[in-house]
Amino acid sequence: MHFLSDDLEEYLANNSQKEPKLLQELTRETHLKVIQPRMLTGHFQGRVLSLLSKLIQPKYILEIGTYTGYSALCLAEGLSPDGELHTIDVNAELYDMQRTYFDRSDYGTKIHQHVGDALDIIPKLDIVFDLIFIDAEKKQYDNYLETVLPKTKPGSVILSDNVLWSGKVVEPLDKKDKTTKVLLDYNKKLNEHPLLDTVLLPIRDGLTLSRVK
């Protein structure tokens, strides 16, 4: 679902920071070689992630859901000079493609890839994260949140993607639609969580910003 007209979306992109050439190439290759290319973060949201990261200037970033690496590269743009980005994905087949683009960027040595279930990997990371981006299996969003919270500190920012779920969150709920129900509960939990300040932004398919108190 497009929440804005194509003309407005094009206007937003044209009046935001230009998409870096490397990310243009990654977008092209993703559409040519990888299934479900619509999962790609894309130009406008990518620039939003980049700017947020630059404002926060995180030392440690955690990304849950790498896909082909577009969002990781955007987030890495704001890393502090001695920073690290840890990104997790279950699909080992995309590892080499991700690495190719990471190594072509200015942040290759700062980006660490993990393959497997994020719920198993995160507890083993002895790191307190300044910025976390959740963009993987939607039915696990609540579990991701509970797993990452112990890895945060006051001021840490948690970003959650696809929280509008193509507008289904405001449509009559189909009892068989488990994913939308999970996201409805997750959005409510973020907004009411005593440890978080939260705002939901209508960027692309919905992006929630939560700050740890």
Image (spheres, grey):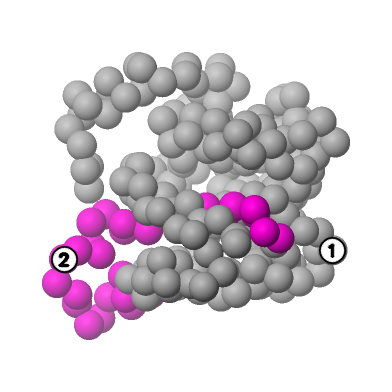
Residue at (64% x, 53% y) in the render: 155
Residue 154 sits inside the magenta stretch:
yes
The tally of labels here is: 2
Cβ–Cβ under 8 Å for marks 1 and 2: no
Q: Is mark 1 on a helix, strand or loop?
A: loop
Relative height, residue 68 to residue 64 (above, below): above
Residue at (77% x, 43% y) in the render: 59
| Residue 76 drawn at (x, y percent) | 67, 35
Which kind of residue does numbered mark 2 sit on?
A: Glu
> Which residue has dot 2 on it?
171
- Judged from this view, the residue extending furthest toward the left is 172
Tag 1: Cα neighbours inside 10 Å, few (<14), some, or many (≥20)? few
Residue 165 seen from this side: yes
Q: In which quarter of the image is residue 90?
A: bottom right
Residue at (52% x, 52% y) in the render: 159
| Residue 178 drawn at (x, y percent) | 33, 77
Relative height, residue 44 to residue 67 (above, below): above
The quadrant of the rendering that contains the C terminus is: bottom right
Residue 179 seen from this side: no
Q: Quadrant of residue 148?
A: bottom right
| Residue 19 drawn at (x, y percent) | 49, 21
Closest to the observer, 96 or 109 = 109
Q: Distance between the residues labelled 1 and 2?
A: 41 Å
> Which residue has dot 1 on it?
126
Residue at (22% x, 26% y) in the render: 8
Q: In which quarter of the image is residue 154?
A: bottom right
Tag 2: Cα neighbours inside 10 Å, few (<14), some, or many (≥20)? few
Q: What stretch is highlighted in magenta?
A: 153-182
| Horizontal relation, residue 148 to residue 199: left or right | right
N-terminal-most mark, 1 or 2: 1
| Horizontal relation, residue 179 to residue 64: left or right | left
Identify the mark at residue 15; answer none if there is no mark: none
